[in-house]
Amino acid sequence: MGKAVTRPITLITGASRGLGREVAQRLVAEGHTVLAGVRDPAGMKPLPGADVLPLDVSDPASITAAAASIRARHGRLDGLVNNAGILLDQDGDALTLAAELLQRTFATNTMGPLRLVQVLAPLMARGGRIVNVSSGGGQLSEPATWAPAYCISKTAFNAVTVQLAEALRPMGIAVNAVCPGWVRTDMGGAAAPRSLQQGADSILWLLLQADPLLTGGFWRDGARIPW
């Protein structure tokens, strides 16, 4: 008898809608065991083929509980897509930015993914891949002035990506950031020029197709972009 086929186990945060849901659906079709991390499992539409995991990345206790569940039920993790994110501000600039709003944004967009990787990395073996869904709004090379809390949190998220890539390089785990572009989601709005499928393509390229030795970069549509 041949060896049993081992299905990759991949966690996607913010999987109840938008890009997270699209990535989860496509990974189910690819044959992955998909763990769909969502804040409110009761309030989401069914996600056929996925294992829904209660997870609020802004809550350290929720992160600890989710990690314990993955460890107990699966014993390992092959891929992680840090997709969960919030956009709380639209207008204003850094001079009028409220500290409380910035703290709330950081809790989800920056600190949450960092804590998640810290507790899940021990479950990942060599060849594991972590994809951090960032934004062009976080680029220092082309500074954005809209939604300052969101943009600052994504700039910091890019810095977290670089630090994690270096920390996990000796373990053979790749960590990259991706800009999916302006996508038609609840966050992006109906005027956005890119479809869910186009936005998800960049994420899935890093997760499924990119050289596993590729780490510590910022990518869009399979091409490196400036930080």
Image (cartoon, rainbow, N blue to C red):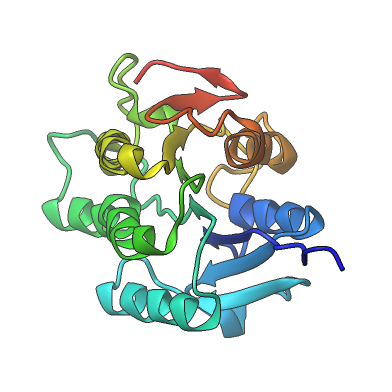
Residue 150 in view, yes or no: no
8 vs 52, nearest the viewer: 8
Vertical position of residue 212 compared to residue 101: above or below:
above
Vertical position of residue 6 compared to residue 163: above or below:
below
Residue 120, image x, y percentages: 38, 63
Residue 104 in view, yes or no: yes
88 vs 28, nearest the viewer: 28
Residue 15, image x, y percentages: 58, 62
Residue 48, image x, y percentages: 78, 72
The residue at the point 70 percent across, 62 percent down is: 7
The total number of labels drawn is: 0
Q: Left or right? Give the position of 107 relative to 72.
A: left
Q: Left or right? Give the position of 169 relative to 199.
A: left
154 vs 121, nearest the viewer: 121
Q: Left or right? Give the position of 219 relative to 106.
A: right
Q: Left or right? Give the position of 136 relative to 117.
A: right
Vertical position of residue 99 compared to residue 219: above or below:
below
Vertical position of residue 165 compared to residue 82: above or below:
above
Q: Quadrant of the N terminus?
A: bottom right
The residue at the point 35 percent across, 62 percent down is: 122
Residue 99, image x, y percentages: 12, 52
The residue at the point 32 percent across, 34 percent down is: 158
Q: Quadrant of the C terminus?
A: top left
Image quadrant of residue 86? bottom left
Image quadrant of residue 204? top right
The residue at the point 56 percent across, 42 percent down is: 188
Give the residue furthest to the front.
1
135 vs 36, nearest the viewer: 36
